[in-house]
Image (tube, grey):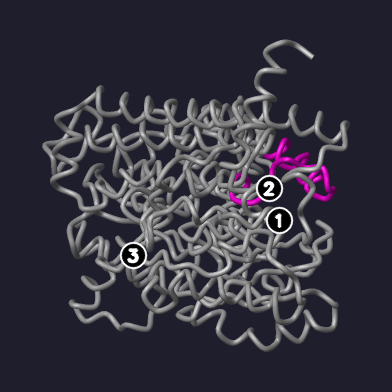
Amino acid sequence: MKITDKLIASIDKKLERFDPIWQAEHGTGGQRSRYYDKTGVEKYREWRGVKDTMYDYSQWLKNLGSMGLMVGRNPVRVVKGMWEYRWMGSYLGTFIFINRLFEGYRGVELRIAHMNMHQIVASLTRLIGRVLANDKRLGGGPISDTMVPMDEVIPPLFMKGFKELTGIPLQLLPEFIICDIDQHLPPHYIDVSESFGLAADVCSRCSVETGVAFDDAFPIFGKAFLTTNMPCNASECTSMFQRRRINLPDMPMTFAMQHNTKEGNEFSVEVLKDAVNFVEEQYGVKYDWDNLFKYAKELNEQNTIEMEKWEFFKTPYSPLSGISETLYKLYEWAASNGTEHRFTKNDRKVIKIMRKCYDEKYKAFGGKTRHRAFMWGPSAVYYTDMPTWCQNCWGITLVLNMDSTMGHNMISTEDPDQAIKDLARMSEKAVMRHHAVGGWENVNALWDWAKAFNCDMILFNDNIACKGMNGVHAVMEEQARELGLHFIFIEHDLEDYRACPRRDMRKCVSNYMSIVLNEEPLDPTLVDFDDSEAY
């Protein structure tokens, strides 16, 4: 052993009493011992040993650097954005959010998690800077009229066929991402939408998007707007409100709801063709298939690597799981979708690490995992950092989440006719679509996913305001019993924490683990705590 390794080992031994995992094992504290009461604010950073603590801090600095570059490129517009948009202030909670996401991570798990997260931070900060620099509410910019606002669940790859234009998921910044970082922001927009007369029992995601529109909190850019009916019919109503408030010509991309059929795909193909014609007419450009093919190759490589990751997810030897997989894949698909080479480069590095770990039969989280779970859950699992909490508290590793299973089909890079069919199929299986709507077989596929990834447990997020899913509760529970799977319903109201606080969401899991399975927690400080004031 090298002298430096001996020195580090000696320091680690002397300071191990400050490690929250060691504290939990020895009854002297745990992860929540580091926090101020009711908050997500740490009194001090998590001690993970010399190497991992230094690495974790270096990644904090790296993410800070990305934010600094965003401000440095256009400080005036960033300041204006802070004054104009309430949601801009919530991004200041990003560092607290990331710290919570990776609590208890050590070694390879920590490195892969930060590799993935930094791609999100770097991509997102560049996007925020670009939007603010060209926002017509703030005075416009050089590419304002070549930007195309589009619904957050339309694959960005589709817009790469317009070489001169830039597609921007409109809801991504004020709603789609920020609801994961700050649980206190969405209720404001919900209250705004309800003050205009919108019913209080609708899906909170749609209510938030509507409130953002009513509050004039969407950046304005472009000449026309692409809307959609995805993932559900409530989104159609949301699109109508946005159309009236944003006041741009729009093209409703109404994809087939029953999309696992040949007829459904054919219908969706025609929708994409209509969208191409609409953008060509509004912006005076022509669709460039060669440019699309260029970026489709990027996406195909990302999907090929993702399929290989899945093979490792089926084993006990994957260092990538939980929130570091699901949040990354969600962003990579919904916001990047083959349009940024940085994600491809990152995927290549991550898969090499995963191959090595498999060869060495590496067991993540110190081999403390007791259960392998598939999670059916949207945004509520992120602002609650549910996957991380499940692992640290009860030894439940979230092998895969619903968000990781969408739109992984390949796109033809030679034939336009086949490529548009492939794009239609990918569009149909967008965010929240593949396991929520589009036919009973989509919901029922949950069992196949759990079986394929050798899961003994399913965490099923029970959105109390989702009219589409309320009717399947008893049916799913009955099937789980027949299949012999541990099945835990976690009630939540998606983006509105007031109806189902995240403390209550955690209790759904803790009660099952302690009462039904009679198991003891790995970290007692995580079983029940008040974080109602946390981001």
Are dots 2 and 3 in contact, CB under 8 Å?
no
Locate residue 258, reporting x and y percent: 61, 71
* Camera-nearest label, 2 or 3: 2
Are dots 2 and 1 in contact, CB under 8 Å?
yes
Q: Helix, strand, or loop for circle 3?
A: helix
Name the residue nearer the viewer: 519 or 100: 519
Kind of residue at badge 2: Ser
Q: Name the residue under label 1.
A: 397
> Badge 1 local density, few (<14 within 10 Å), some, or many (20+)?
many
Q: Helix, strand, or loop for circle 2?
A: loop
Can you say which quadrant of the picture contains the C terminus? Answer: bottom left
Q: In this view, does 33 lie above or below 165?
A: below
Q: Name the residue under label 2.
A: 321
Q: Reading the chain from its start, which is encountered first: label 2 or label 3?
A: 3
Q: Can residue 522 be seen in this view?
A: yes
Q: Name the residue under label 3.
A: 239
Q: Reading the chain from its start, which is encountered first: label 3 or label 1?
A: 3
What is the magenta range?
303-325
Name the residue nearer the viewer: 9 or 372: 9
Name the residue nearer the viewer: 82 or 194: 82
> Badge 3 local density, few (<14 within 10 Å), some, or many (20+)?
many
Kind of residue at badge 3: Ser
Locate residue 340, reporting x and y percent: 51, 30
Can you say which quadrant of the picture contains the N terminus? Answer: top right
Report if residue 319 lies within the magenta region. Answer: yes
Report the residue at 62% width, 42% height from top.
105
Q: Is residue 351 left or right of residue 381?
A: right
Report the residue at 59% width, 58% height from top.
389
Name the residue nearer the viewer: 166 or 389: 389
Q: In this view, does 489 lie above or below 433?
A: below
Q: Is residue 521 above or below residue 484?
A: above
Locate residue 73, reporting x and y percent: 25, 22
